[in-house]
Image (cartoon, rainbow, N blue to C red):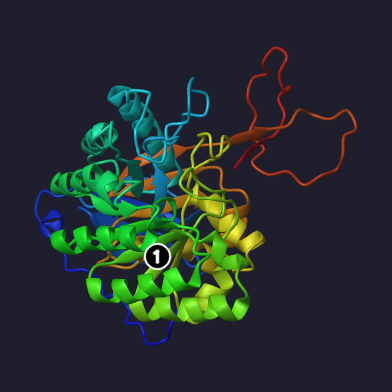
Amino acid sequence: MSADRKQPQPPEDGAATGAGATSLLLSHARLADGRAVDVRLVGDRIEAVGTAGSLGPVAGGARVDLTGHLLLPAPAEPHAHADTALSADSPGPAPYDVPCDGSYDVPCDGEEVQRRATEAALLQLGHGATALRAHVRIAAGRGLTSLDAVLRTRRSLHGLGELTPVAVPRLLTGVAGAEERALLRDAVRRGGVVVGGRPDGDPDPAGHLEAVLTVAAEHGVPADLHTEGDDPVWLARLAAMAGELGAGVTIGPCAGLARLPSEVAGRAAERLVAAGVAVVCLPQGGCGEAGSRGVAPVGLLRAAGVRVAAGSGALRDAANPVGRGDPLEAAYLLASQGGLAPEEAYGAVSAEARAVLGLPEVRVEAGFPAELLAVRGERLAGVLSLAYSRIVVHRGRVVARTSAVREYCDSAAALDLPRQARTKRPPEPGGPQAGPVVRS
């Protein structure tokens, strides 16, 4: 990141921290810097952080013992696909298989979209993502059926997590694009919707870009565009137009940038920095809107000063039938294959992802939002490697728990191995016979 970027300040405490607010004490947690602490939450803010054992809960408040857990700012999901999620096994064509004229032969089932979108959002919440940006197709012939279904999902998740849909048209230019231009404006009028687009799939990519940014400017909302990023001329045009918008512009997955000569990609990155354009890469695989697989050149972009976040992309749909939608897996891949340090990799799915979504920064310090993730483990590198058991905190309360237990049967070889958590349980028929239990 560029050195002259200002550091966000702790947000002012809101009404949620006043009288009558709920409270929660997270005791004996370990921070990434190695400290063991107690963290007291009141309402949707962190009220105090002290050494382990030094804080008590507010009268009537709850306590969660985080012994053995690493406490982190919660990740966010900047690039999901809510309308196609969990559709890999569905009969018929993929939900994003659309002819060039944007028409559909298969009717859209809004209830089915809502069911899958809700299940996917809860799955990602369980992984730790308390805020999600989900791309949703709008198109001539289907209208806003899928978008309305995802908006219903957003309302049903109130209090559990934050879901923001992105309305993604395919065709916006010429006479054929008139209907989707109208749909895009109608979508934004629903409220809380980001303007999306896919210039690479339009016969006039520059005209598509102009249409998207015009709607975003009219309504004062961010724009989030799918692009391979393999055309430096188009990227220069994007940077010039985005610099005039005044609202946040995000592009991704930009895998095509990695195929450009490094000096050409470097000049494109400099233009993106100057225009304030952020990039979301997809380390876990592509998505139905992306033309190819691969990962954006994260190191080159970061060295130039581009804000780079990491998203999940497809979640078990035709584009990636084994997608997990797990931000910690995205961070793991950035560290194991992308050359980032564990702290940088986790930052791409937490601090950088939240910044891309326009959310306030989270630190485990007093005054910051109580958006937290506790993962069993002692160090960040180990957590990214084996992130099994998780506790998710949104707006100051536990909203999801995942607990994993590994069991080993006693070995006749009687190996003299170090044991941990030597918990015994009654034997089960056909199962491990009273072996050691390791909680992960």
**Residue at figure coordinates x 23%, y 36% from the top left:** 144
* Relative to 157, 401 lies left or right: right
Q: Nearer the viewer, residue 113 or 355?
A: 113
* Residue displayed at 45% across by 47% down: 289
Left or right: 335 in relation to 57: right
Residue at figure coordinates x 37%, y 73% from the top left: 237
Asked whether residue 165 appears in the rendered view, the answer is: no
Give the camera-side residue of 242 and 154: 242
- Residue 267 is situated, as x and y percent measured from the top left of the image, at 50, 81
Q: In the orientation shown, which residue stands out farthest toward the right?
A: 413
Q: Considering the numbered disc 1 on the image, is that residue within a helix, a strand or a loop?
A: helix
User: Label 1 crowding class (10 Å Cα cut-off): few <14, some 14-19, many 20+?
Assistant: many
Total residue callouts: 1
Above or below residue 36? Residue 92 is above
Position in image of residue 88 (x %, y %): 52, 29
Quadrant for residue 108, please give it.
Answer: top left
Considering every residue shown, the one lying at the far top of the view is: 429
Amino acid type at circle 1 is Ala
Read off the residue under disc 1: 351
Residue 94: x and y in percent read: 47, 31
In the displayed structure image, the side of residue 52 where residue 133 appears, left or right = left
Residue 241: quarter of image: bottom left
x and y percentages locating residue 229 in the rendered image? 49, 64
